[in-house]
């Protein structure tokens, strides 16, 4: 049996499929050769200073949970080279897409993890992140599947532990029931404060927002997105 603190323990927050259509030969090669160079190795002790994970010097650390095809992560890591980004995506095809894009736009401020985000979060040192992004996560719309939603009391505890005081948790979704779910859970958690001060604040995209393909699809189908920002108390 795998111990609770072992990096290969059972997944807690990923319930989707791990693979889609068969990868092209070059994509499969990137998974085999390039991903190990960028993957955060949880078998090693977490460094006291997370900046040491990156090839380039960085001043801040930002985590993106479930980056899909990597469009947002690629954009953000390119526009902000002084920030170190850790991107999590267990879906192999999404990871392969990002690795392909990195061939033409390498990043010294980017590291990756290809398994359950909770494993990485539990490995990280306390108060080591400046921001966490959860963008268009699987809403698990059926009531019997609500427990699969990433936003939960336990995972907010996790984020509260690794965010610095004043650090930001950003959440975007086009599913109103998940938006309301997230607002309720964050309101019940003593470590998080919703930063909105006027109605427009949670309908306007985050500063520098490049948009995502999921967002474009939602807008085409008449589902207005919501953008929520919560601040870790203490800063």
Image: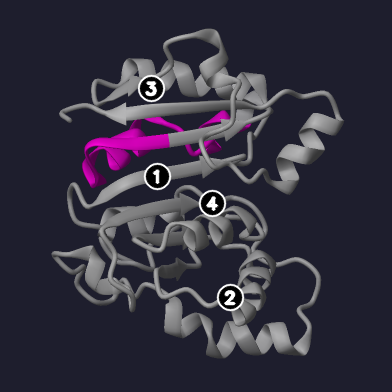
CA separation, marks 4 and 2?
28 Å
User: Residue 107: image x %, image y %?
Assistant: 47, 73
Residue 4 falls within the magenta-colored stretch: no
Residue drawn at the location 76% of the way across and 66% of the way down = 20
Please tell me which of labels 4 and 1 falls first in the chain.
Answer: 4
Badge 4 density bin: few <14, some 14–19, many ≥20, Cα 10 Å: many
Marking on residue 105: 2
Residue range highlighted in magenta: 145-169
Query: Residue farthest to the right?
Result: 221
Q: Quadrant of residue 42?
A: bottom left
N-term mark: 1 or 3: 1
Q: Which residue is mark 1?
A: 132
**Residue 218 falls left or right of residue 92:** right
Instruction: Determine whether, in the image, residue 102 is placed left or right of residue 222.
Output: left
Estimate the spatial distance between the alpha carbons at disc 3 and disc 2, rounded to whole Å: 36 Å
Name the mark nearer the viewer: 4 or 2.
2
* Rendered-image quadrant of the C terminus: top left
Residue visible at 59% across and 82% down in the picture: 31
Query: Which of pointers 3 and 2 indicates the residue nearer the eye?
Result: 2
The correct choice, above or below, for 228 with respect to 129 in the image is above
Going from N to C along the chain, the mark reached first, 4 or 2, is 4
Q: Which residue is mark 4?
A: 14
Helix, strand or loop at label 2? It is loop
Q: Is residue 201 above or below residue 163?
A: above
Real-space Cα separation, disc 4 to disc 1, in angstroms: 17 Å
Residue 227 place in picture, x, y as percent? 55, 28
Label 3, on which residue? 186
Query: Dot 1 surroundings within 10 Å: few (below 14), some, or many (20 or more)?
Result: many
């Amino acid at each position: 049996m795998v111990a609770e603190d072992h990096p290969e323990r059972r997944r807690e927050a990923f319930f989707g499929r791990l693979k889609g259509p068969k990868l092209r030969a070059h994509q499969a090669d990137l998974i085999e050769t390039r991903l190990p160079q960028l993957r955060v190795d949880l078998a090693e002790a977490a460094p006291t200073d997370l900046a040491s994970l990156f090839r380039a010097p960085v001043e801040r650390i930002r985590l993106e949970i479930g980056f899909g095809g990597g469009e947002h992560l690629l954009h953000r890591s390119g526009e902000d080279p002084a920030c170190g980004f850790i991107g999590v995506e267990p879906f192999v095809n999404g990871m392969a897409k990002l690795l392909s894009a990195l061939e033409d736009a390498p990043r010294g401020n980017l590291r990756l993890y290809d398994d359950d985000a909770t494993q990485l979060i539990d490995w990280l040192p306390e108060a080591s992140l400046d921001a966490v992004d959860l963008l268009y996560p699987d809403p698990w719309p059926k009531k019997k599947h609500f427990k699969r939603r990433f936003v939960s009391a336990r995972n907010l505890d996790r984020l509260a532990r690794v965010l610095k005081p004043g650090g930001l948790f950003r959440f975007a979704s086009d599913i109103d029931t998940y938006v309301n779910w997230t607002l309720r859970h964050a309101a019940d958690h003593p470590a998080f404060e919703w930063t909105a001060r006027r109605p427009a604040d949670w309908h306007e995209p985050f500063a520098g927002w490049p948009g995502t393909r999921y967002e474009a699809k939602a807008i085409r189908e008449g589902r207005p997105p919501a953008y929520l920002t919560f601040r870790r108390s203490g800063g």
